[in-house]
């Protein structure tokens, strides 16, 4: 009997420790060769316990977006920005149909993905990454702006690098994962590659996070910024849905409601219990732009903020905290 | 020998100096622009006019190639027969005004004109005024003014001029001019046809195989018809119609494996001019209407872009010569531009009206000129644009010139309305420029020497730059930059002439510092950085020799390092040789010529990642029959 109880407890603990959610993008039920680029003006996409912010400008001639998109496009032949939502593998990771596409913001040079719900403040397992058709063909063949990797001689030590960092409690973490989407730095040209297969990237070394920050670097950079198209594809992103013990055990579900989201003029912070603590409003760059007393501020004025993603970190006097991703329209 | 000559020329360029202008049948260098027929000439420091004799000998050139070889201004060329724009005194391409018979002709969408699309054979006179002249000509004349003018000779009854040439890269040109008329009426028809594969040899890197440029062919066909009517000495009526089509393939860059892109540029330009002269009064009216269309297609990336615009211009100009010393001029202009682009939200229209008043005081050794311009654009008045110029003779051989003027450039339609990123709140670029210079001439028997030197200073505020928008995923236009430009120009010319022998030599050197006065993250600029594609120094040397019917001309150009969007573009030098044999028998004359460009086969670029042609040759014949 004692053994049975121990086994049940062990299973329960194990299942708690290894609870995870995978964001596969399949839930968007896209048809074949279809995509979402934020034209629904919802400010982003929620999949599993991850939120993928998106900024979209609804212009009939030149609709434009940045942040994240969702795609099932299979065109791995057409170069150029008009095919910016296709993956070079012509499918999602592990043979799936749908995947995500990230496009860096020019100003920040980054795109930020938020961990929400049970994953908020927890740890990441890993994700699959690949090149977009646009970036891949640009690096392979060059275009009117960007160079072909290797240059005219084939010997240029070019690279296309994805950096993955995290925010935790409104602070940019020191941990960083570097992943090369193309690497021509080897003296031996036969080692040169441009990634065209979905590749798993282990994110566990980042530890607990409220959000992940993706930024890109290229050797082909000029006065007007990076010439290589600042895109990559992502899929099957696994969150642990629990904090890593000893890293940020204070991140908990405080049962505080924050709404509306997206917000236009005000954010309401509603809680049934008597709480004391502080609210920090944080930009996507990690800069704290406002601090408020939790017990007094049930409404935060955001009308003067620029559109985009913000984090709201609530920290109680006993050290417990929770972070919310907020979209300002 | 080649290395020695190159070395000497480099040395000359570095130590001082520079442009030797000279050519056989020749560049006319005047101390001052003499374009009274266009508008009362402003006192400028560096002015040139090339007449029909010069232009006839360069009939195979585009305006870009012509200015590159005949002047010391910087031409930013994407390669043979590709897009070519100009930079004068460190100003941008859209800060240089191009006039066709006195009316601006550049695109209101871009604020510039591709100089490779202007055949020299369609001009009877080309003028260049270096330096700001916004008061006279309005927006875009910050760096200088280039004028192409058509004229007729009422003294001849018939003229047939035919030019044909073949050149490297399968390039072929045909030009024809037929003029007929009498003392009161002249009809002048000009045709221009050129095509080529333009498959220059691309030499990417020392250990990489050379290859022929691909997707670089071009075809250009133009017709210019002019009618000149002069019923009496008081009246002259002129009508021009210029129709042209240009198809260009756009070759890949050095770091691009393939290109399938092409562009067509079509335009129809019409102009009517009426000139009325009565005693001390001169009244001139011009009306122009341009219909232009540009279509870009890149099948690889499935991109098509269509831009169209119509421009209607009118000008009334009245000049009153009060007496020998005092002269007044009043002018009013109106311009209506209507443009369509897939990147505009529908059609856009811009209306500009401007007024100019100018006074010139002249004495044998002194000239003083004052001008004031006021411009009204889309229901807004701009700041008044004043001009003050003085020319003072110092003794018999030296002339001192001084000029102070306000300069401005209006935002282009793309700056205002391009979607996304256009900004209708943009202000005009504006600032002040000052120039001072000294020119001297000495002649003795068969020798003559001319020297001139000038310095300029210019500050432009609200310089328009495209930078990432607040949202951060597209670029938008704003008045964020300030640019300070200063520099000097020095020219020395020598000429010897005896019977059927003549020799000319010239050196010129331009120093131009044109830098941003701000720091920016993107585009990445630091205070003091030189503007893109603006060489700090540029030098040209020319030598020409004519003996009886034979002539040879050598020209060498050295252009200092420039800054591109990605990399520094190394200094380059190019030498060109031109041989001519000309014959003349009563009413019949002609020329046979051979021109060798880039004689040292230099591997160079002007625009980054765009290869320029190596050594190449052209052979042509020109015959002329006059009655």
Image: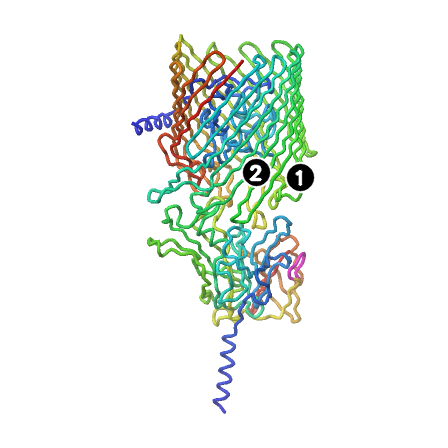
- Judging from the image, mark 1 belongs to the subunit labelled B
Q: Nearer the viewer, residue B119 or A160?
A: B119
Q: Disc 1 to disc 2, how far (Cα)?
A: 20 Å
For the point 39% across and 10% down, the residue is B498
Task: Read off the magenta span.
Answer: A261-267
A139 within the magenta span: no
Q: Position of residue A97 (x, y in %)?
A: 54, 65
User: Can marks 1 and 2 be said to lie on one chain?
Assistant: yes
Q: Which mark is residue B464?
A: 2
Label 1 or label 2, whichever comes before in sequence order: 1
Q: Nearer the viewer, residue A298 or B480?
A: B480
Q: Position of residue B108 (x, y in %)?
A: 61, 34
Kindly state the secondary structure of the residue where label 2 is placed: strand
Up the image or down, A171 lies above or below B162; here it is below
Instruction: Check disc 1: other Cα within 10 Å, few if <14, some if 14-19, many if 20+.
Output: some
Q: Nearer the viewer, residue B583 or B397?
A: B583
| Residue B549 visible somewhere in the drawing | yes
| The N terminus of chain B - image quarter | top left
Number of numbered tags placed on the structure image: 2
For this orientation, the residue located farthest to the right is: B379
Q: Position of residue B483 (x, y in %)?
A: 52, 34
Q: Position of residue B211 (x, y in %)?
A: 39, 42
Numbered disc in front, either 1 or 2: 1
Residue at numbered disc 1:
B348
- Judging from the image, mark 2 belongs to the subunit labelled B
Tell whether B47 sits left or right of B275.
left
Q: Main secondary structure of the magenta part?
A: loop
């Amino acid at each position: 009997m004692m053994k049975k109880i121990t086994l049940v407890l062990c299973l329960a603990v194990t299942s708690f420790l290894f609870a995870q959610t995978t964001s596969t993008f399949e839930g968007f039920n896209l048809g074949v060769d279809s995509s979402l680029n934020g034209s629904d003006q919802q400010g982003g996409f929620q999949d599993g316990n991850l939120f993928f912010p998106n900024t979209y400008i609804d212009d009939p001639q030149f609709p434009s977006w940045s942040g994240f998109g969702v795609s099932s496009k299979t065109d791995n032949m057409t170069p150029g920005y008009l095919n910016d939502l296709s993956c070079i593998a012509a499918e999602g990771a592990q043979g799936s149909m749908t995947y995500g596409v990230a496009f860096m913001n020019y100003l920040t040079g980054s795109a930020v993905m938020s961990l929400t719900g049970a994953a908020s403040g927890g740890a990441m397992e890993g994700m699959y990454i690949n090149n977009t058709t646009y970036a891949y063909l640009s690096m392979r063949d060059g275009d009117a702006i960007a160079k072909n990797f290797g240059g005219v001689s084939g010997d240029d030590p070019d690279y296309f690098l994805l950096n993955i960092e995290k925010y935790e409690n409104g602070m940019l973490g020191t941990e960083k994962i570097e992943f090369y989407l193309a690497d021509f730095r080897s003296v031996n040209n036969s080692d040169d590659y441009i990634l065209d297969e979905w590749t798993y990237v282990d994110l566990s070394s980042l530890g607990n996070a409220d959000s992940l920050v993706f930024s890109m670097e290229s050797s082909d950079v000029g006065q007007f910024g990076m010439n290589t198209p600042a895109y990559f594809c992502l899929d099957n992103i696994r969150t642990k849905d629990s904090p890593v013990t000893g890293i940020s055990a204070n991140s908990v579900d405080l049962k505080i409601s924050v709404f509306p989201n997206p917000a236009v003029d005000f954010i309401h912070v509603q809680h049934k219990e008597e709480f004391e603590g502080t609210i920090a409003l944080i930009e996507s760059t990690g800069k704290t732009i406002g601090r408020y007393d939790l017990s007094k501020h049930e409404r935060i004025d955001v009308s003067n903020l620029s559109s985009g993603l913000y984090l709201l970190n609530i920290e109680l006097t006993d050290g417990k905290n929770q972070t919310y991703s907020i979209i300002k329209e | 020998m080649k290395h020695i000559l190159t070395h000497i020329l480099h040395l000359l360029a570095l130590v001082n100096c520079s442009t030797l202008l000279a050519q056989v049948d020749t560049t006319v260098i005047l101390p001052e622009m003499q374009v009274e027929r266009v508008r009362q000439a402003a006192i400028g420091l560096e002015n040139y006019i090339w007449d029909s004799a010069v232009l006839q000998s360069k009939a195979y050139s585009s305006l870009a190639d012509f200015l590159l070889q005949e002047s010391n201004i910087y031409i930013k060329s994407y390669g043979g027969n590709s897009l070519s724009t100009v930079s004068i005194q460190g100003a941008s391409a859209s800060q240089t005004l191009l006039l066709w018979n006195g009316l601006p002709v550049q695109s209101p969408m871009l604020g510039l004109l591709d100089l490779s699309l202007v055949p020299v054979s369609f001009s009877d006179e080309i003028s260049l005024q270096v330096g700001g002249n916004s008061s006279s000509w309005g927006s875009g004349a910050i760096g200088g003014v280039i004028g192409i003018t058509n004229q007729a000779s009422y003294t001849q009854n018939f003229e047939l001029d035919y030019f044909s040439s073949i050149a490297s890269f399968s390039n072929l040109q045909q030009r024809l001019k037929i003029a007929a008329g009498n003392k009161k009426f002249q009809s002048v028809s000009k045709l221009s046809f050129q095509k080529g594969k333009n498959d220059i040899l691309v030499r990417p890197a020392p250990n990489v195989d050379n290859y022929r440029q691909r997707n670089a062919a071009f075809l250009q066909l133009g017709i210019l018809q002019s009618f000149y009517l002069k019923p009496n000495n008081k009246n002259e009526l002129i009508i021009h119609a210029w129709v042209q089509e240009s198809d260009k393939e756009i070759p890949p860059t050095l770091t691009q494996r393939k290109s399938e892109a092409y562009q067509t540029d079509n335009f129809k330009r019409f102009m009517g001019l009426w000139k009325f002269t009565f005693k001390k009064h001169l009244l001139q009216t011009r009306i122009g209407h341009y219909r232009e269309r540009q279509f870009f297609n890149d099948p690889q990336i499935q991109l098509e872009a269509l831009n169209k615009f119509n421009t209607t211009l009118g000008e009334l100009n009245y000049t009153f010569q009060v007496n020998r010393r005092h002269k007044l001029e009043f002018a009013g202009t109106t311009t209506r531009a209507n443009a369509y682009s897939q990147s505009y939200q529908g059609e856009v229209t811009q209306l500009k009206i401007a007024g100019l008043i100018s006074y010139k005081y002249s004495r044998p050794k002194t000239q003083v000129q004052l001008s004031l311009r006021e411009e009204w654009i889309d229901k807004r008045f701009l700041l008044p644009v004043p001009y003050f110029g003085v020319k003072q003779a110092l003794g018999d051989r030296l002339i001192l010139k001084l000029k102070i003027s306000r300069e401005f450039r209006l935002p282009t339609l793309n700056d205002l309305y391009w979607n996304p990123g256009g900004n209708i709140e943009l202000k005009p670029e504006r600032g002040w420029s000052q120039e001072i210079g000294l020119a001297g001439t000495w002649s003795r028997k068969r020798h003559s020497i001319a020297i001139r030197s000038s310095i300029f200073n210019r500050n432009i505020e609200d310089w328009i730059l495209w930078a990432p928008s607040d949202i951060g995923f597209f670029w938008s236009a704003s008045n964020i930059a300030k640019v300070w430009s200063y520099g000097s120009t020095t020219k020395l010319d020598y000429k010897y002439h005896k019977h059927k022998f003549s020799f000319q030599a010239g050196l010129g050197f331009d120093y131009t510092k044109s830098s941003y006065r701000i720091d920016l993250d993107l585009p990445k600029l630091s205070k003091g950085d030189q503007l893109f594609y603006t060489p700090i120094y540029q030098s040209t040397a020319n030598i020409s020799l004519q003996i009886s019917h034979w002539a040879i001309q050598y020209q060498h150009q050295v252009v200092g390092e420039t800054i591109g969007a990605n990399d520094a573009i190394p200094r380059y030098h190019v030498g060109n040789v031109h041989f001519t044999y000309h014959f003349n028998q009563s009413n019949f004359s002609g020329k046979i010529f051979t021109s060798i460009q880039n004689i040292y086969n230099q591997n160079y670029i002007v625009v980054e990642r765009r290869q320029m042609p190596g050594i190449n040759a052209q052979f042509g014949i020109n015959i002329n029959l006059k009655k």
